[in-house]
Image (cartoon, rainbow, N blue to C red):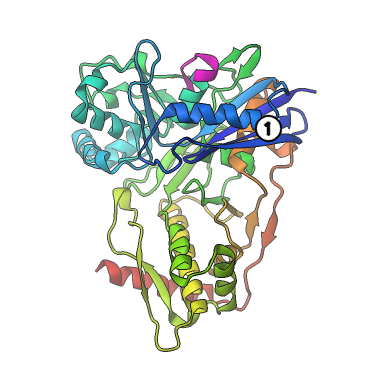
Amino acid sequence: MPFVLGVDSSSQSTLVELRDADSGEIFGSGRAAHADPTASIEQEPLAWWNALVDARRDAGGTLGVSAVAVAAQLHGLVVVDQEGQVIRPARMRDDPEASRDAESLVHALGGPEQWVHACGSVPDGAFSVAKLAWLRRTEPGEFARIAKVMAPHSWLTFRLSRKVVTDRAGASATGYYSPRDSEWRPDLLALVDPDKSWGPCLPRVFETSQPAGDRDGVMIAPGTGEPMAAALGVVLQPRDVVVSLDHGYVFTIRDRPTEDPSGRVQGLADGTGRFLPCVSSTGAIGALTSFARVLGVDANRFDRLALEAPPGAQGVMLRPAGTRIGSGRRAAGGVLSGFDANLSPELVARAAVEGVAHQLLDDVDALRHADVPVGGRFILLGGGRSHALTQALADLSGRAVALPKGDRAVAGACVLAAAAFHGSGPGDLALAWGLDRARELEPNPNTDAEELRAVHKAAVRNAEE
């Protein structure tokens, strides 16, 4: 019986699963925290590798596998020298220090329209192209040593296979790859440094089912980013929408590219040859933890309080702060309003939960405004999906919310490993494994979703004026 190993290397920990390459049945799983799980903007790649090794051991280190695939944080920059050694800590996520470099790059090419035509997205501080510009500006010595430029999943695949590779989906998140034309755009990197020979620095782009190499006879797949792996892990179909709380993305897939000059929607590629329009979420989920702390209750008690209050929280509202950050995203934080002498912990909890749900639905609206069809299944992923938040999303959207079990990114990584092992399409394989199955939570038919959404949107407009 052939086994495959899927890896999900997130910001704080690494999760692995062992599955039957034919049936998809799970035979083991393991998890390991990173050495510095609080790190966000800068992380040591070696911590990811050590966590992968520890998680593999936790899953049953003696059980052999036939193929491995890695899914990892989407927006990150790893640079190595001629000997393959990491030059400096990886720059991760939406890097505020690289935001000014992103703005300069957008201006240098002639504006947002030119960028979305070139690579599908308007780069902000999250994109590798902006991080490279920051590195050249602030650490020219380290920049001069760069021999290879990789994303987190590419670097972990490099450690496994000694091959510098990526897939089309992961490449599309760099800011110097065209998902429409499926090719690198070194001319965009010339805006960072016109004198550097960029071609040799870039990974080879492999098909999803094309093995990147092997390690002691184990086939290594090219890997991908977390949202793309999660899309496979839920068997995402056009018009479906995924809200991934842990990874901070709202996305769908479609058959043609998305080019949004507002910068709100990133026009990425997926792992099946299609396209993955994606919105980086506001990070508002942290507000629930903050409000629970203020109320002096744990997460379970906070959830129960929110469920005891009526939809709309009797006019109490958590609206987002008016300030915006890169690509039109709103900064974390908000304002609690609409309360009087009858304010209760239940109303505060409900208002906080609905505030988060509204912001996530605003992200879905951003897809819709970019002419992306979003009328299919509504799929909620992540450890922060409390019952109250799930119900609020269902109520305010007027749609059933699907709740797949487990980590769908690691399931998608298993699919990628099996696809490379079998030489087959990952989408068909994920469907054959039954990864599309999920229980659903229906909306409350007595909730006036249209009215509540209108009130929220009016409050947001007023905050921005």
User: Left or right of 105: which side holds 426?
Assistant: right
Residue 255 visible, this angle: no
- x and y, in percent, of residue 401 in the image: 62, 59
The percent coordinates of residue 41 (x first, y second) are 35, 39
Q: Using the rendered view, name the quadrant where residue 64 is placed.
A: top right
Query: Which residue lies under the disc numbered 1?
Result: 59
348 or 367: which is nearer to us? 348
Span highlighted in magenta in the image: 159-168
Examine the structure image and report whether residue 90 is included in the region drawn in magenta: no
- Residue at image point 46% right, 69% down: 352
What percent of the width, then of the height, locates residue 463?
Answer: 29, 69
Q: Quadrant of the C terminus?
A: bottom left
Q: Quadrant of the N terminus?
A: top right
Q: Residues within 10 Å of mark 1 (few under 14, many from 20)?
A: many
Outermost residue to the right = 1
Task: Name above or below for residue 333 compared with residue 425.
Answer: below
Q: Is residue 245 visible?
A: yes
Instruction: Decide which of 365, 443 is in the foreground and name it.
Output: 443
- Tell me: 326 left or right of 58: left
| 65 up-or-down from 411: above or below | above
Q: Would residue 167 be counted in the magenta stretch?
A: yes
Amino acid on which disc 1 is placed: Ala
